[in-house]
Amino acid sequence: MSTITQKETLKVALDQASPGKLADALAKARLGTMLTPVEWDSGVITSSAIVTLPGMGALYVQSVRVVAGAESNTPHVVCDSSETPGAIVTGLYSVAVSVDGKTLTFSTTVDQVIVRYIPNSATALTDSFARS
């Protein structure tokens, strides 16, 4: 009978918190960066309904403010990717965040946004964990 060995992922290494691996796992995830909220300004962009966040994207989006565009100066509720972006009620809009946290989809084009978020891990938690 053969034994199936599952690869150790970064998530497993972090969950197990083995003293011999924890420092390497935390460094690979860049935990310090993940625990630091980012406020990112897109600057003036070509009118677009989809905005891509820099780097690895967002683990959690706290707030979205449209600075320039049709929905500027109105509150935006952050929703998951299954939500169709648009007006929820007069003066309140939704913005959809992709599953990977890399893109925001608006109901209409925007020209500048400010997004406050917690960054994703520098390495996907499902990636194989190999000590460096």
Image (tube, grey):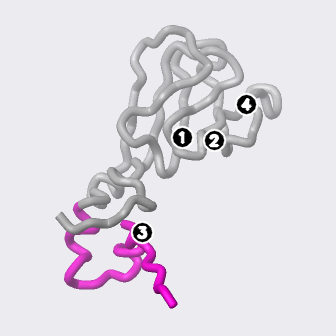
Mark 3 and mark 4 lie on one chain; the one further toward the N terminus is: 3
Label 2 sits on a secondary structure element that is strand
Residue type pointed to by label 2: Val
- Mark linked to residue 78: 2
For the residues labelled 3 and 1, say whether their Cβ atoms are less than 8 Å apart: no
Residue that lies at the very extreme toward the left in this rendered image: 132
Disc 3 crowd, CA 10 A, few/some/many (<14, 14-19, 20+): some
- Mark linked to residue 63: 1
**Residue 74 in which image quadrant:** top right
Q: CA distance from mark 2 to mark 3?
A: 26 Å
In the rendering, at what x and y percent does residue 21 appear?
24, 77
Q: CA distance from mark 3 to mark 4?
A: 32 Å
Query: Mark 1 or mark 4, which is nearer to you?
Result: 4
Q: Residue at x 65, y 19 (%)?
A: 71
Q: Which residue is mark 4?
A: 85
Mark 1 and mark 2 lie on one chain; the one further toward the N terminus is: 1
- Mark linked to residue 11: 3
For the residues labelled 1 and 4, say whether their Cβ atoms are less than 8 Å apart: no
Residue type pointed to by label 1: Ser
Q: CA distance from mark 2 to mark 4?
A: 9 Å
